[in-house]
Amino acid sequence: MSLEHILLGLLRQPASGYDLKAAIDSGIGHFWAAELSQIYPTLKKLQKSGLLRSRNAPSKRGPGRLVYETTAKGHTELANWLKSGPQIGDARHTFLAQIFLMDELKNYPSTLQFLEQLRDRWAMRLAALEGIEKMWSARVPNFPKALPLAEFHRHMTLRMGIESNRAWLTWCDESIHRVQERIRKEKNRG
Amino acid sequence: MSLEHILLGLLRQPASGYDLKAAIDSGIGHFWAAELSQIYPTLKKLQKSGLLRSRNAPSKRGPGRLVYETTAKGHTELANWLKSGPQIGDARHTFLAQIFLMDELKNYPSTLQFLEQLRDRWAMRLAALEGIEKMWSARVPNFPKALPLAEFHRHMTLRMGIESNRAWLTWCDESIHRVQERIRKEKNRG
DNA sequence: ATGACCATGTAACACGTTACATGATTGT
DNA sequence: ACAATCATGTAACGTGTTACATGGTCAT
């Protein structure tokens, strides 16, 4: 299970399940998602295996917090996972399946509209990611060369998000252009 | 469920569960995977809902085949799914999580090796996809402009595969370069 | 007082993989 | 004879989402 290792990694700083949900959404949201209902049981399971320990802590508002942190055994497990080589999941891209089958509609304008919706969403995502990088670079002198070890690794994942989003946008624009050409040709023939 | 709609779409040509597994692996393998143990029950479920019908057919070798095809109701359902807009799944990229946490190893050579493994796998995938396009273009005169409706849509998904793989490779090379620079700097300082 | 946020959890369901079971045919 | 391929299926398990349950605090 990858979520186990992700929690293990994020918990090198003590945090509660609620904190981890926020850290995932804000920090790695562009390539990972997790719900609280999955996080809480996973933390308990990790503690049972001796990879995490927890303590109760008060909260300013709301109920008491359960703060977890990684044990020595947890560090070992995390290191082994990182050394085990890249886990390239079979990414399922539902929207590609939709395009693959979209000839069913026998109608170029439907395809066009679909691609434009895709482009809009990706343009927004790309702008968000570029914004994050811009703010980061404003904060750190000699960015990104001067980034310390941990930030350097985090920055690589941000760059990956930006670069793939850019490629997808380019592909969208190309595809939109090709569809528009076909619509034009049909008109001239009809 | 997306697999339901994918089977529905592929079944505009009659086929057995076994055939569909082969069609998925060879046709959309670069963005979708499915096991026979998932395909068979899904087909039964679709038939029960009236979106597919089946008939028995003999086989040259092995047991009898169950050949399915889409009903009118199935076509309607498929069209509705295609018109419902792009489904952008929260793609989970485990390898990005690994990089994000890899500062744990406190060791640039580990990161370097990881990135090189990623690059090698993507280089192979890219070569495979480009090979498919090359063979396709050799077979069809005036490729890709002359492609008919269905093939045009399939070609767009192939292009997406090629373009994102290329972007990932570029990102890999960039990242490898950045890590190597850091290793060099450490040596000079040490 | 109403809604947003803090904070933890359970239950039911949906989706997907791995392992197992069965058995015929074809090529080496 | 042995392995690969054809062909269908079940069972157990792992992973992830949605809905539900509970209740305190803070700002408007």
Image: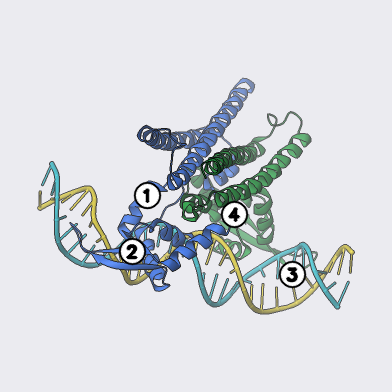
Chain colours: A blue, B green, C yellow, D cyan
How many residues crowd around disc 3 within 10 Å: few (fewer than 14), some, or many (20 or more)?
A: few
SS under mark 2:
strand
- For marks 3 and 2, give the CA distance: 55 Å
Most extreme residue toward the front is B190
* Residue A111 appears in the picture as rendered: no
- Estimate how packed mark 1 is, as few (under 14), some (14 to 19) or many (20 or more) residues with alpha carbons within 10 Å: some
On whether disc 4 and disc 3 are found on a single subunit, the reply is yes
Mark nearer the viewer, 1 or 2: 2
Task: Tell me how far mark 1 sits from mark 3, CA to CA.
Answer: 50 Å
Disc 2 target residue? A68
Which numbered disc covers residue B63?
3
Q: Secondary structure at mark 3?
A: loop
Q: Amino acid at mark 3?
A: Pro
Q: Earlier in the sequence, mark 1 or mark 2?
A: 1
Comparing B142 with A140, the one in front is: A140
Closer mark to the observer between disc 3 and disc 2: 2
Which is nearer the eye, A150 or D16?
Answer: A150
In the rendered image, residue A187, in percent from the top left (x then y), is placed at: 59, 22
Residue under label 4: B7
Q: Secondary structure at mark 4?
A: helix
Check chain identity for marks 4 and 1: say if they share one. no
Q: CA distance from mark 4 to mark 3?
A: 22 Å
* Horizontal and vertical percent position of residue B71: 58, 53
Q: Amino acid at mark 4?
A: Leu
What residue is shown at x 63% (from left), y 39% (from top)? B162
Residue A72 image position (x, y, % from top left): 43, 66
Q: Amino acid at mark 1?
A: Asp
State the residue lying farthest toward the top.
A188
Which residue, given by chain and number where applicable, does mark 1 sit on? A25
Image marks 4 and 1: residues in contact by CB distance under 8 Å: no
